[in-house]
Image: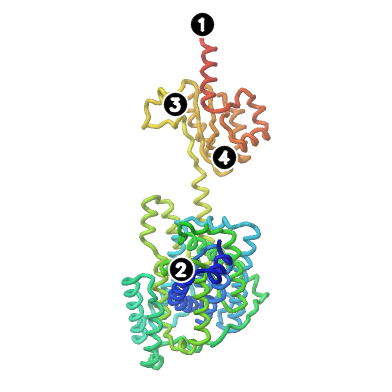
Amino acid sequence: MTGLGSTVQALRHGAPSELRFDVVAGLTAAAVVLPKAMAFATVAGLPVAVGLYTAFVPAVIYGLLGSSRVLSVSSTTTLAILTGAELGSVASDGDPAKLAAATATLTALVGALLLAARLMKLGFVASFISVPVLTGFKAGIGVVILLDQAPKLLGLHVTKQSFFADLASLVQHLPETSLSTLAVAGTTLVLLVGMEWLKPHSPAPLVTVAAAIAASWLLGLGAVGVSTVGTIPQGLPSVTLPDLALIQALLPGAMGIALMSFTESIAAGRAFVKPGDPPVDANRELIATGAANLGGALLGAMPAGGGTSQTGVVRAAGGRTQAASLVTAAASLATMLLLAPLLSLLPQATLAAVVIVYSAGLIRPAEFQAIYRVRRMEFHWAAVAAVGVLVFGTLQGIVVAIVLSLVGLALQTAHPPVSVVARKRGADVLRPLSPEHPDDETFEGLLILRPEGRLYFANAQNVGERIRSLIAEHKPRVVVLDLSRVPDIEYSALQMLQEGARRTSVTLWLVDCNPGVLDMVRRAGLDRELGPDRLLFNARTAIERYRKLQALSAPG
């Protein structure tokens, strides 16, 4: 039982001891999620209250609809930086009303796109970004976030442009660093890193935020030049309607954000499935995250998705159902209603430190090393994806990541192996001819070739050239094409086979065609061109037929 069913069961019929685990997990997660949500709102260039709204409405809706038992839905590092880039393109002047309308429009578009993807059964699209490319993309995002937050750590004001322009501007303004702001940031970083090192998944953000607020109040940090969050509206968020005039401008960015929201949610949900838990349903996740974003759009939330770190906190604290998410949402509501005045004293440098500590994990040198060790080409894709984010920008970086993944897929399938098949001496075993088995027997005048993988327009030419080179090397009278490892053959590849059969002087036999391939061969009329005696059951049948023909043609 998942989603609404499991949550309601936990609330109504669950044993007190069972529900207690979710309450503890929800409160523990709130101690981590709420400070991070406020920090991520600042990454997006939004008021910190938006972070609280995002930790409230989407969490409730996902908790009732989602398929994962423990996925925690709120803002995430990646979504925050993508949202900031998109909002900056339509509300660069920072006008509060315009920014609120743009946020509502963007979040609603993300939700609508996720729901539309469910209607079209596009849950598989999340698999279109390969792991190495996603590693590079997230590393690029991590570097962008570190640079984005660095001025807040130093008490500087840098006009945002491109990554490299911002980096040059930061270096230029370093002499203007506010020592008091730097001291606050440094203390926060030490506390956060120290607590996470001593006890991972601890409420380190809550402790550091509470300590920073206390220090701001007792020491009057605002009076010595330390920038604070400022006034936060107390109470429930007001209803904000999307601005239809912004749809065209925000739609391309919303598509990228929706893709990343779904990708992160699926990855986080599947990462924390325990034995006995129901599987995470990709199409159901589209409904849950889509509805969560649509609902959040009306009540001031920014685009939301499942987060790995916060979900890890829920699981580590013993969370068992989505009741934990409802507890976290309730904590967010209580913060909005009761603690807003206190949060106004929070130093911006503290929020920046929280963002940096929890965004640094996006940059994973060990993962780059592992990719490099296994396959250098995919390491190059990861590196290009990371650089693409820095050069072209975050949203354009998604396009770079997707294009790289598709190019990588095309390259992997563009050169499918074509093996020469031989028979193990003394046994009825057919296998690719290789130096490891020098005693395997072949048959003079007979060449058995076995291509592997789908044959289509991108690899038809390469397969054809490989077959021609092997024919030139072995000079057979009969070529047996074993199609047992070919699940599908596209028109271009089929045409290559037909032309090859017409032009070559050797005899072509087709064996072991899969039903789909055989259907295509018949539709193209290749079966009639070859004749029924050249379409055989399998390679063994071909060997026996060839040997009989040889015996019949032998003299005497």
Label 1 near label 4: C-beta < 8 Å? no
Viewer-nearest of discs 2 and 3: 2
Labels 2, 4: front one:
2
Q: What element carries label 1?
A: loop
Distance between the Cα atoms at labels 1 and 2? Answer: 84 Å
Numbered badge on residue 428:
none
Residue 251 image-quadrant placement: bottom right
Q: What residue type is labelled 3?
A: Arg
Kindly identify which residue carries mark 4: 487
Residue holding disc 1: 556
Q: Is residue 282 above or below residue 32?
A: above
Give the mark nearer the N terminus: 2 vs 4.
2
Relative depth, front residue between 533 and 427: 427
Q: Which residue is denoted by mark 3 in the rendering?
A: 423
Q: Work out whether mark 3 precedes mark 1 in sequence or the reverse, and give the earlier one.
A: 3
Whether label 4 touches label 3, CB < 8 Å: no
Q: What residue type is labelled 1?
A: Gly
Q: Position of residue 418 (x, y in %)?
A: 49, 35
Distance (Cα) linking label 4 and label 3: 23 Å
Classify 10 Å Cα crowding around label 1: few (below 14), some (14-19), many (20 and above): few
Secondary-structure class at tag 3? strand
Q: In this view, does 46 lie above or below 261?
A: below
Identify the secondary structure beneath mark 4. loop
Circles 2 and 3, Cβ within 8 Å, touching? The answer is no
Q: Is 79 above or below relative to 467?
A: below
- Between the residue at mark 4 and the residue at mark 1, the CA separation in whole angstroms equals 44 Å
Cβ atoms at labels 2 and 4 below 8 Å apart:
no
Name the kind of residue labelled 2 in the image.
Gly
Instruction: Tell me, for residue 319, which label it has, or none.
Output: 2
Marks 3/1 in contact by CB < 8 Å: the verdict is no
